[in-house]
Image (cartoon, rainbow, N blue to C red):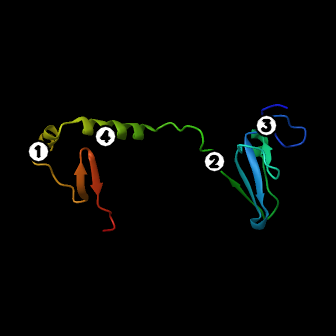
């Protein structure tokens, strides 16, 4: 037996990439990432069959996104991280000088410990 799970559709030998389950009480078909192990009432589908999947009239198809893969950080994430590192590496005296002498207190800031700040909830 091959360690690669195959599509459950008849005469399809392609590798499975998604798992289909049914919730009969809710008239819902759920298509998600490939399950970690095969279950008796689930169907493994290849990429082609999972894209073309349709449900009976009156049923809803819920497609769950595959979040297991690594996501690449966006440019904004990297820029925010770089700015936080620069601010944390700057000595407090130089930071105060850059701010024009006395540091302006943020009205939302409750406490400060090193480069970390505790902020007041906007609801309060």
Check disc 2 and report the residue beneath it. Answer: 65
Q: Residues within 10 Å of mark 3 (few under 14, many from 20)?
A: some
Q: Nearer the viewer, mark 1 or mark 3?
A: 3
Q: How much space separates mark 1 and mark 4, taking CA atoms?
A: 20 Å
The answer to which of 88 and 39 lies nearer the viewer is 39
x and y percentages locating residue 94 in the rendered image? 14, 37
Cβ–Cβ under 8 Å for marks 1 and 3: no
Horizontal side of 33 relative to 24 (left or right) equals: left
Q: Nearer the viewer, mark 1 or mark 4?
A: 4
Q: Residues within 10 Å of mark 4 (few under 14, many from 20)?
A: few
Q: Earlier in the sequence, mark 3 or mark 2?
A: 3
Of labels 3 and 2, the one closer to you: 3
Residue placed at 24% from the left, 44% from the top?
A: 114
Per the image, the residue denoted by label 1 is 100
In-front residue for pair 3/20: 3
Q: Earlier in the sequence, mark 4 or mark 2?
A: 2
Residue marked by disc 4: 84
Would residue 51 be seen by someone viewing this image from the given angle?
A: no
Tell me, for residue 5, which label it has, or none.
3
Helix, strand or loop under label 3: loop
Marked residue nearer the N-terminal end (3 or 4): 3
Residue extending farthest right? 11
Using the rendered view, name the quadrant where residue 44 is placed: top right
Residue 46's spot in the image, x, y percent? 77, 39
Q: Position of residue 57 (x, y in %)?
A: 81, 62
SS state under label 4: helix
**CB contact under 8 Å: marks 1 and 2:** no
Q: Quadrant of the C terminus?
A: bottom left
Structural distance between the alpha carbons of marks 1 and 3: 65 Å
Q: Is residue 113 visible?
A: yes
The spot of residue 49 in percent (x, y) is: 79, 43
């Amino acid at each position: 037996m091959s360690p690669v799970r195959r599509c459950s559709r008849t005469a399809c030998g392609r590798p499975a990439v998604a798992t289909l389950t049914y919730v009969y009480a809710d008239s819902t078909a759920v298509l998600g990432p490939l399950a970690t192990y095969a279950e008796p009432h689930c169907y493994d589908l290849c990429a082609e069959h999972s894209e073309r999947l349709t449900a009976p009239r009156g049923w809803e198809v819920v497609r769950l996104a595959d979040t297991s893969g690594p996501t690449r950080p966006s440019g904004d994430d990297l820029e925010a991280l770089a700015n936080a590192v620069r601010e944390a590496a700057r000595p407090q005296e130089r930071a105060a000088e850059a701010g024009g002498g006395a540091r302006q207190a943020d009205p939302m800031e409750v406490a400060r410990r090193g480069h970390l700040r505790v902020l007041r909830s906007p609801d309060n």
